[in-house]
Image (cartoon, helix red, strand yellow):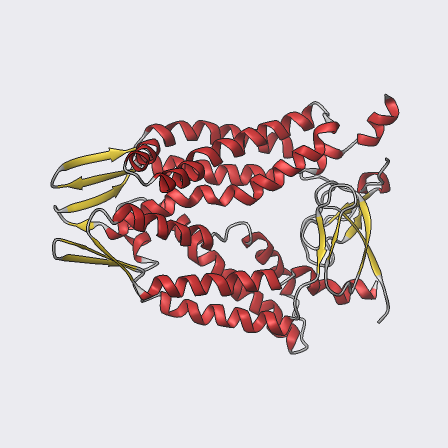
Amino acid sequence: MAKKSETTACKECGVLVSVPLHLGIGQYRCPRCEGLLYRRGQPFSHVIVMALAALTLFLPLLFLPILDLNIMGQENSATLFKAFWVVYKDGYYLIALLALWTGILAPVAMLVLLLAILLPIHFGHRPHWIRHAYRLYETMREWGMAEVYLISIVVSMVKLHGMGTLHIGPGFYIFILFFLTFFITTVWFNPDDIWLDDALEN
Amino acid sequence: MRWKTDIDAGVQLCLHCRKLHPLERKRCDRCGSPLFQRKPHALAKTFSLALAATLLLIPANLLPMMIVHSLVGDDAGTIMDGVIYFLEHGEAWIGVVIFVASVFVPFFKLTVLFYLLWIVRFHRHAKARLGLKLYRLIHFIGKWSMLDIFVVALMVGLVQFKNLATIVTGPAAIAFMLAVVTTIFATEAFDPRLMFDHENQRSSDG
C-alpha cells in the first residue's frame, strides 16, 4: 500500500502538520498541543452492524416502561418519552423539547445519518448529499446526551425511593444496552475516513 | 521553538473535514462547510453568551427547580435545597453528584470561558497550553450540567398521583436550561487557536 500523507492543520492550535494516511492502528496527535489529529476508525461494515443493532434496541424503548412507582396502591409508570410529555403538557415546551432532543432524538438521528452515509458507500455509491449528512452528523455530536439521561434515571431512582415502592422496568435495561451499542458505534466510526479516498487522490 | 501555522502559510482549515484551502475560497469543496481562518467574531460571541449564561444562573439557583404538592403540603426546592437534603439524609454521594453536575460544573465552565477570553484578549501566550487543557475539559464535562433537567423531567413524569402527590416543574428549570444551552453555544463560538496566534511574533519581538 502506498504510504501517502495529507497536509492539514491542528483544529486547536493551528499548526500545520502532515498526517500519514492509512496509519493502521493507532492515532496521530498534534506535535505542539497534543490535540487528536487522526484516529483510524473500524471498517465501515462493522460500524453499520453496530448502528443497526443500536437502532433495533431503540424500538422497544418507545413502549417499555423504565420506572414504575407505586404510592399507596396507586401505580404510575414512565417510558423514556412519557416523562417529557408530562412536562410538555404542563406548558414547559422548551424544556420538554430540548430534553427530548438531547436525551433521545439526537442520538437516534446520529445513528440514522450514519447509516445514510455509510450504507451507500458500502454498496459502492457516493450520492451528492453525503456531505450534508456528514455535516449534520458532526453538528449533532455536540447535542447527543444519552449518557446524561441514563445517569439521571439512576439519580431519580434514589430521589424517588422514599416516596413509594419503585420498580425498575425492562426499558431501563434496554436503554443501558442501547447506550452501550450507540457508544461503541460512535467510537468505531471516524467520519474523517469518508474523505480518505478523496485525500488519496490529491 | 517556532511553529508554522495556517496563518503563516496563508491557508484556512475546514473545521469539519480538515481539508486545507486557499484564503479566497468561501466553502469547502470536499464537505461544503463554510470556511474561515478563525471563527468569525469569536471573542464577542463567546463573551456575550457567557455573560448571558452568568446572569441566567442567578434565577436558576434562587428559584425552585420543582414543586412537590402532597398531602403534607407544598414544598418548593431550589437546587441547593436538594443537595442539602441528601447530605443530611445520609445519601451524601447523590448530593455530591447533584452538586457537581448542577452547581459546580456550570460555574466552573463560565469561569474557564472568561479565563480563556482573558488569555486571548491580553495575549498571554504562556498560558495557551493550560487554556487549551481547560477548554478540552469544559467541552467534555459540559453536557453533564443537563443532568438536573432530566431528573426534573423524570420526577414530574412519574409522580402524578392527583392530590396524593404531584410534582410540577419549577421556574428555575427554564433559567437553568437556558444557562446550560447558552454556555454550550459560548464554548462552541470560542476558537482555541486564537490563544496560540502570534506566539512567534511575540517571541521574536521580545
Can you give x and y, in whole percent of width and height, for residue A9 in the image? 77, 47
Q: Nearer the viewer, residue A34 or B175?
A: A34
The reply to whether residue A87 is in sight is no
Q: In which quarter of the image is the C terminus of chain B?
A: top right
Q: Where is residue B93 in the image (x, y as percent from the top left)?
A: 38, 41
Q: Residue at x 67, y 75 (%)?
A: A125
Residue A75, image x, y percentages: 17, 58
Which residue is more in the foreground, A85 or A35? A35
Q: In which quarter of the image is residue A194?
A: bottom right
* Vertical placement of residue A177 versus A145, above or below: below
Rendered position, B133 above or below A144:
above
The image quarter in which residue A190 lies? bottom right
Q: Which residue is drawn at 68% across and 25% down?
A: B121
**Position of residue B132 in the picture relative to residue A157 (left or right):** right
The answer to whether residue A96 is above or below residue A112 is: above
Quadrant where the N terminus of chain B lies?
Answer: top right
Name the residue located 64 percent from the left edge and 71 percent from the top edge.
A44
Q: Where is residue B125 in the image (x, y as percent from the top left)?
A: 74, 28
Whether residue B87 is visible, yes or no, is yes
Residue A99 relative to residue A119: left or right: left
Seen from the viewer's position, the closer of residues A13 and B103 is B103
